[in-house]
Image (cartoon, rainbow, N blue to C red):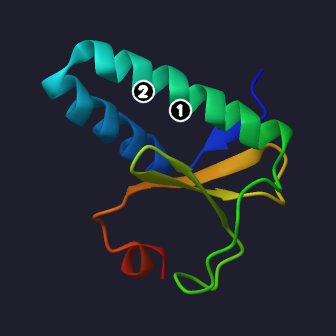
């Protein structure tokens, strides 16, 4: 059992990201999926590895980059909650506040 869970928003984010990548290359989507799962597990095992971004939100969430995306997660929860997975082109500040 993984040491992480997804918020409803993160589930939608993850599915959308993989669909977007698959539209260009199914193999790239498979590779991205595997990489994201590796990072989710890393965050579950080492929840302090990410960093706070007080410039983006006052919420008690940490950020960890994967490709051009930022995994936004709650490190103090057990299991770790993946709150959002946001692209670099998105207005992260508006989304999180």
**Mark identifier at residue 21:** none
**In this view of the protein, which residue sits in the foreground, 23 or 1?**
23
User: What residue is shown with label 1?
Assistant: 36
For this orientation, the residue located farthest to the top is 27
**Left or right of 25 on screen, residue 57:** right
Q: In which quarter of the image is residue 92?
A: bottom left
Instruction: Please state, as top left, top right, bottom left or bottom right, where the N terminus lies in the image.
Output: top right
Q: Which residue is drawn at 84% across and 60% down?
A: 76
Q: Residue at x 72, y 31 (%)?
A: 41
Label 2 residue SS: helix
For this orientation, the residue located farthest to the left is 24
Q: Is residue 11 above or below residue 55?
A: above
Residue 47 at x, y percent in the picture: 81, 50
User: What residue is shown with label 2?
Assistant: 32
Residue 56 at x, y percent in the picture: 52, 81
Q: Is residue 2 above or below residue 81?
A: above
Label 1 crowd (10 A; few <14 / some 14-19 / many >=20): some
Q: In which quarter of the image is residue 25?
A: top left
Residue 68 at x, y percent in the picture: 39, 50
**In this view of the protein, which residue sits in the foreground, 92 or 79?**
92
**Left or right of 26 on screen, residue 23:** left
Label 2 crowd (10 A; few <14 / some 14-19 / many >=20): some
**In this view of the protein, which residue sits in the foreground, 15 or 68?**
68
Q: Dots 2 and 1: beta carbons under 8 Å?
A: yes
**In this view of the protein, which residue sits in the foreground, 84 or 23?**
23
Label 1 residue SS: helix
Residue 54 at x, y percent in the picture: 63, 84
Q: Residue at x 51, y 20 (%)?
A: 34
Q: Residue at x 84, y 37 (%)?
A: 45
For this orientation, the residue located farthest to the front is 67
Spatial distance from mark 2 to mark 1, Cα to Cα?
A: 6 Å
């Amino acid at each position: 059992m993984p040491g992480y869970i997804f918020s409803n928003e993160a589930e939608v984010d993850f599915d959308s990201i993989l669909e977007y990548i698959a539209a260009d290359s199914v193999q790239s989507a498979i590779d991205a999926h595997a990489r994201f799962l590796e990072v989710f597990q890393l965050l579950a095992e080492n929840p302090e590895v990410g960093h706070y971004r007080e410039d983006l939100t006052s919420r008690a969430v940490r950020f960890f980059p994967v490709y051009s995306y930022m995994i936004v997660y709650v490190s103090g929860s057990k299991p770790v909650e993946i709150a959002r997975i946001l692209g670099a082109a998105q207005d992260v500040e508006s989304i999180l506040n």
